[in-house]
Image (tube, grey):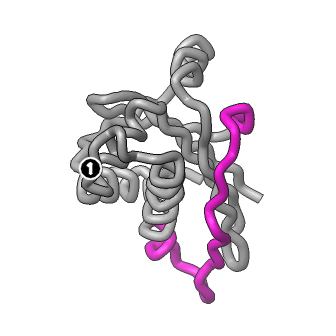
Amino acid sequence: MKNLMTLIKTSISEVLETMFYLPVEFREKLSPEKIGSIKKEIKIGCSLKVSGSFSAIFQLFIPDPLLLNMTQNFMGEDPENCTEEYLNGTLKESLNMIIGNALKNIDTKTPPDLDIPEIIDISCLGTDSLIAIETIDGTMIMEIKLN
């Protein structure tokens, strides 16, 4: 699991810094109070299932103001033009790029299969392996559930 966490963190840094111009730092532990305050700014998240030679579920939760900022930068749109469809697309594509980039470095005989990312509700955030992703505009949370 430690090697997977290192791969995921490296991938998060590479994708967010390259695609969204977001420098990131990681927090090792989140207090229940901090998780609660972050969750107040989040309506939706995204889930991506991976199966085959490696099996896991990855969930990404981005605070609404940060997601809007990312969508503006990614789509080159003004805030008033960033529809729910654009916001959902940015969230899905962010998770897809992060996980795809990380999985290319996992040594398996056959490559894992990635499902299509799905939008989920914030209530799906559990307490499994969490990664707190600090940016200058807010804190994202990634949850990893190994199967």
- Looking at the rendering, the stretch of residues picked out in magenta corresponds to 102-126
In this orientation, does residue 77 appear?
yes
Q: Amino acid at mark 1?
A: Asn
In screen coordinates, is 55 left or right of 28?
right
In this orientation, does residue 3 appear?
no
Q: Residue furthest right?
A: 147
Q: Secondary structure at mark 1?
A: helix
* Residue position marked by numbered label 1 in the rendering: 73
Does the stretch in magenta take in 73? Answer: no
Q: Residue furthest top?
A: 33
Q: Nearer the viewer, residue 5 or 81?
A: 81
Q: Residue at x 66, y 34 (%)?
A: 122
How packed is label 1: few (under 14 Cα within 10 Å), some, or many (20 or more)?
some
Q: Residue at x 26, y 44 (%)?
A: 22
The tally of labels here is 1
Q: Residue at x 60, y 43 (%)?
A: 45
In screen coordinates, is 14 left or right of 36?
left
In screen coordinates, is 127 left or right of 35?
right
Instruction: Give the vertical position of 114 relative to 34 (above or below).
Output: below
Q: Residue furthest front?
A: 80
Q: Residue at x 61, y 88 (%)?
A: 109
Instruction: Give the vertical position of 51 relative to 111 (above or below).
Output: above
